[in-house]
Image (cartoon, helix red, strand yellow):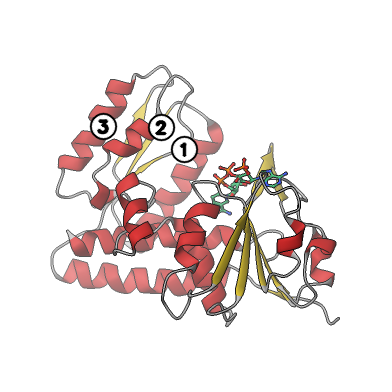
Amino acid sequence: MPPARLLYGKPVAEAVLGEVRAGVTALREKGVVPSLATILVGDDDASAGYIRIKQRQAAELGIRSPHTHIAAAGTQEQLSEAILAYNADPGVHGILIQYPVPGHLDYDAALSLVDPGKDVDGMHPVNLGRLAIGLPGPLPCTPAGIERLLAFHGVPVAGRDVVILGRGATLGRPLALLLAQKRPTANAAVTVVHSGVPDWARHTRRADILIAAAGVPGIIQPEHVKPGAVVIGGGVRYEGRRLLPDVDERCAEVASAITPRVGGVGPTTVAMLFHNVITAAERS
Ligand SMILES: NC(=O)c1ccc[n+]([C@@H]2O[C@H](COP(=O)([O-])OP(=O)(O)OC[C@H]3O[C@@H](n4cnc5c(N)ncnc54)[C@H](OP(=O)(O)O)[C@@H]3O)[C@@H](O)[C@H]2O)c1
């Protein structure tokens, strides 16, 4: 087999960010400055770093990024107040609560309080419901990024067998809904496997497109991949700063195309977040 083509996320993200820049310009011409508000609870270094990266990128794109920092011992009421204040502010188009929040706080309750129109993560129950019934709304960033990645790299999806390993709320489940939708870049025969399917390899071995969404390092081995299939690594686990992907690197010897170990799905996720901010600002 010739070596697998690498499906890089950076050019996909650049294409999406090009659309974001055009959207920012059009909004500013109408006197609207798009704005993404961020809320961080606690002092976790990694979380603070992710917020800084998003703020820096927002500034580069011409998007305002007001920020609220709540101390680690902050209460659910303080978190709710911050969310409600941003909900009520017409100058704020998107709200991002940095995940995770300290253990004494209820992230899901906080997310449910966000105005669904400002939910740029696309994870509010109302927006996941809209996705389930095919109504327009903000899409969860990582699944939407994977659909864009496949389309950008010319991987046909419509009519093909897509198998997703993992049914988690952030990735596998919404991705299955998305890729089964009736659109040219989706329209696939989607199968979702998980820990309740002990012989899941029986399914992955017939996949034209295999998407790992488990968060179990090395769970996808070459013997789980059909020769010539396309393999997308969405699931990752961090050990300190080390990124451990679901997909073993040796799968590149069997696949026809595969996301690289680093720089595959990740960059597309952040780009889709800003895409959702612009769409929210346009709708507001
Ligand atoms: N690249 C990115 O930008 C990005 C963004 C978001 C998330 N992610 C990653 O995506 C992954 C999934 O996220 P999530 O929140 O959806 O995760 P999650 O809720 O933990 O779901 C993991 C799924 O994998 C399945 N699974 C775990 N171990 C398995 C095994 N040994 N055999 C079969 N199935 C197994 C679980 O099955 P059960 O349902 O039966 O327990 C579950 O459905 C995580 O690694 C996360 O870090 C990446």
Residue 223 in picture, x, y percent from top left: 84, 63
Question: Who comes first in sequence, dot 2 or dot 3?
Answer: 3
Q: Is residue 133 above or below residue 229?
A: above
Left/right placement of residue 17 relative to residue 5 reads left
State left or right for residue 52 relative to residue 66.
Answer: right
Q: Residue furthest top?
A: 73
Q: Are marks 2 and 3 in contact (CB under 8 Å)?
A: no
Query: Could you tell me how far apart the alpha carbons at marks 2 and 3 are, in whole angstroms?
Result: 13 Å
Q: Nearer the viewer, mark 2 or mark 3?
A: 2
Q: Mark on residue 82?
A: 3
Mark 2 crowd level (few <14, some 14–19, many ≥20, 10 Å Cα): some
Residue 224, relative to residue 195: is it above or below? below
Residue drawn at 47 percent across, 49 percent down: 53
- Looking at the rendered structure, the kind of residue marked 1 is Tyr
Q: CA distance from mark 1 to mark 3?
A: 15 Å
- Given residues 106 and 17, the one toward you in this image is 106
Residue at image coords 27%, 28%: 80
Question: Is tag 1's residue or tag 3's residue first in the polypeptide sequence?
Answer: 3
Does the closest atom of ligand 1 sit within 8 Å of the Cβ of label 1? no
Q: Residue at x 44, y 43 (%)?
A: 51
Report whether 88 appears left or right of 110.
left
Residue that mark 1 sits on: 99
Question: Circle 2 sits in a helix, a strand or a loop, which is it?
Answer: helix
| Circle 2 residue | 107
Query: Where residue 135 sits: x, y (%)?
Result: 29, 63
In the rendered image, the quadrant that contains the C terminus is: bottom left
